[in-house]
Image (cartoon, rainbow, N blue to C red):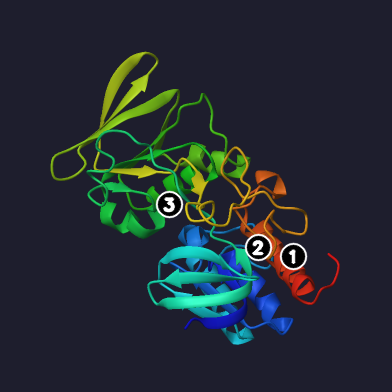
Amino acid sequence: MSKKYDVIILGAGPAGLSAGVYTVRYGLSTLAIGKEPGGMASEATVVENYLGFSAITGAELTKRFEEHAKKAGVELLIYTNINSINKRGAGFEIETDKGRFSAKALIIALGKKKRKLQIPGEKELAGKGVSYCATCDAPLFKDKITAVIGGRNSAVTAALFLAKKCKKVYIVYRRDKLRSDLVLIERVRKEKKIEVVYDSVPISVNGKERVESLTIKRKDRKEELKLDGVFIEIGAVPSTELLTKNLKLKLDEEGCIVVKPSMATNVQGVFAAGDITNSSNKFDQIATAVGEGAVAANTVFRFLKNIKY
């Protein structure tokens, strides 16, 4: 037998936990399921644009989100895999490593996962110098040479963080200028340990037991950067693998769930919020995720109570 709830939230990041705080306030029994609390937001080196905090680490901010959700009465099932999502009559059943659970409505807030380069050596040397989280792994590269692949906010922030530990940090970017916030670009200019390598595409990560170098293509010629670590920050892709099989959710060309302003999807009883959706003009921010979670919760309440939304 599966345990029954009014609503199950898939995802325990800012969108999912925000939705949970609101659904329990509406009197709805709520379970939030996630691989880890905070999602990708927990990996942020520093958050400087979330209202109320001039500067706070992603780990600390999402820890507060989790504590708030628990105190509000959200039941959390963390560190588990979601194996299947199925429609059962008017409701839904979720099968996880820790059991089966059913609900009258779903809020999908699974967010995104880091995009891979898909080049030789990346997979083989993952955890051996190839990393997707500067916040997690920077201490392993004290006084060493590293490279960050990418040129947007996440890449530039990672490079600035690594510069506090590393002897030298390359930013390898395929364009002719960085595309991050101006305040971050200015910090890069002032940081002597950082060298930006423009118009460059990574070709392979090289090394036997650990990363030893990175081969790049730069202006029609190949170059090899001798280094100890490669941090990949080239964006993220929506976590929708399980969602199209049985639910038949409509996705956009980038694989994000198509939602209405109410956060309702094309499937009755299924709602979505956060980075996994096509809303907010692709502005993937903690603030927008939290807001969408609140909207989704309100819509779920109206759906279950038969109130027009």
Residue receiving disc 3: 161
The residue at 39%/53% (across/down) is 133
Most extreme residue toward the right, as rendered?
A: 308
| Crowd class of label 3 (few under 14; some 14 to 19; many from 20; radius 10 Å) | some
Which element type, helix, strand or loop, lies under badge 2? strand
Discs 3, 1 touching: Cβ within 8 Å: no
Q: Nearer the viewer, mark 3 or mark 2?
A: 2
Q: Position of residue 135 (x, y in %)?
A: 40, 57
**Residue type (three-letter) at the residue carrying disc 3:** Phe
| Residue nearest the observer in this picture, 24 or 203 | 24
Residue receiving disc 1: 295
Give the spatial CA distance, label 3 vs label 1.
34 Å
| Crowd class of label 2 (few under 14; some 14 to 19; many from 20; radius 10 Å) | many
Residue receiving disc 2: 270
Q: Earlier in the sequence, mark 1 or mark 2?
A: 2
Is 271 on the left or on the right of 218, as rendered? right
| Crowd class of label 1 (few under 14; some 14 to 19; many from 20; radius 10 Å) | many
